[in-house]
Amino acid sequence: MAQEMGGHAGEAAAADGVSRVASRNAPAGPSPFRVEAPALPVAKFADPRWTAAGEERARVPLTRLETLWLNTGTLCNLACASCYIESSPVNDALVYLTRAAALPFLDEAQTLGTSEIGFTGGEPFMNPDFLPLLEETLARGFDALVLSNAMKPMRRHEAALLELRERYGAKLVLRISLDHHSQAVHEGERGPRSWGPAMQGLRWLSENGFSLAVAGRMVPGEDEREARQHYAALFAREGIAVDALDPARLVLFPEMDAAADIAEITTGCWSILGKSPADIMCATSRMVVHRKGEPGPRIAACTLIPYHRDFDLGDSLAEASGDVALNHPHCARFCVLGGASCSA
Ligand code: SF4
Ligand code: SF4
């Protein structure tokens, strides 16, 4: 579930020539969350060491691998307007990650003392190996964070989920995307008839006592405090036990658009912005992806840039422990200036 952490335009299409394929439930118009900004100049984000203005580009060292994300594959029951990974019912640019292929990474994560395994897609529940992999993850003592749209693919596994909740309690967290507190905006992004099933899925999780979070967004200009109040009213009306005022339970993501202009991040930005490289997502996480056509899974620097070769760090966590150059618009807009983290 890419948007459960922030799903957006262009990246996959640009990288792999995958075009958005219309599906029965695809939204008809442009995304209500689209970024209004001029086009990104081609000179920006062109050199991993230097910005277009000739300043030294910021880098982020891995401090500790706290979260390992497993991308279960890009296939999804939805085709959201600005899904950054271009998921859809037909896009398998990232193929299903098998249990067997994922196990060596769980082994490695255990030796590194990683505490959390995150699952994202596409829609994880569509991957036939997902439930066995989730069970293996929890049995090994990891915390598990599952990003889902809570629609039909998840509902097919209610019995297995209830059993996992029984055995592992709050070690299993499901974070469900509800793009907006209003049905119109949510369906503008996610397609017609996407609201009702998501609300039903959320209610089912809530009524059955799962540890639950929601991932949302704000339309341009929307005030965060007001957005949280609207979500709170919605959750109260619908009987969903999520504290909308808690940023860890209702995660509101900033926007992403790889084609829109944004400032590049230099080494001087940290002190100007009052931020530290240690606060950035790639200081504490990596993602396993299995790209179509490749012999096995590889490690991407983060959840947001699964296709770009410059952010491919190797085929083991040991190999992927180096610095990351912030040489992508997502680094600036989402992570440094937007201040977001997929594990928040
Ligand atoms: S629901 Fe599917 S299409 Fe929509 S943002 Fe998530 S992964 Fe992308
Ligand atoms: S988008 Fe850039 S800064 Fe953000 S986590 Fe990924 S590599 Fe790091």
Image (cartoon, rainbow, N blue to C red):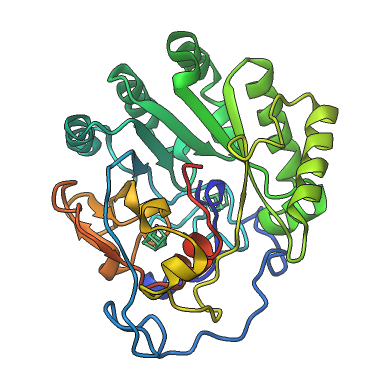
Query: Is residue 198 depicted above or below 313 in this figure?
Result: above
For the question of whether residue 12 can be seen, the reply is no
Which residue occupies the foreground of this view, 217 or 198?
217
Which residue occupies the foreground of this view, 220 or 292?
220
Give the residue at x 19% y 50%: 296
Question: In the picture provided, is 177 more to the left or to the right than 337?
Answer: right
Which percent across, then down, holds residue 110? 21, 29
For the image, the number of numbered tags is 0
Give the residue at x 23% y 49%: 297
Question: In the picture provided, is 40 more to the left or to the right than 62?
Answer: right
Question: In the picture provided, is 64 more to the left or to the right than 230?
Answer: left
Quarter assignment of residue 114: top left
Quarter assignment of residue 32: bottom right
Give the residue at x 19% y 46%: 317
Question: In the picture provided, is 341 more to the left or to the right than 116?
Answer: right
Give the residue at x 70% y 30%: 243
Quarter assignment of residue 113: top left
Which percent across, then down, holds residue 100? 21, 33
Which percent across, then down, holds residue 223? 77, 56
For the question of whether residue 65 can be seen, the reply is yes
Residue most toward the top?
166
Which percent across, then down, holds residue 108? 17, 36
Query: Is residue 250 depicted above or below 292 in this figure?
Result: above
Which residue occupies the foreground of this view, 147 or 322?
322
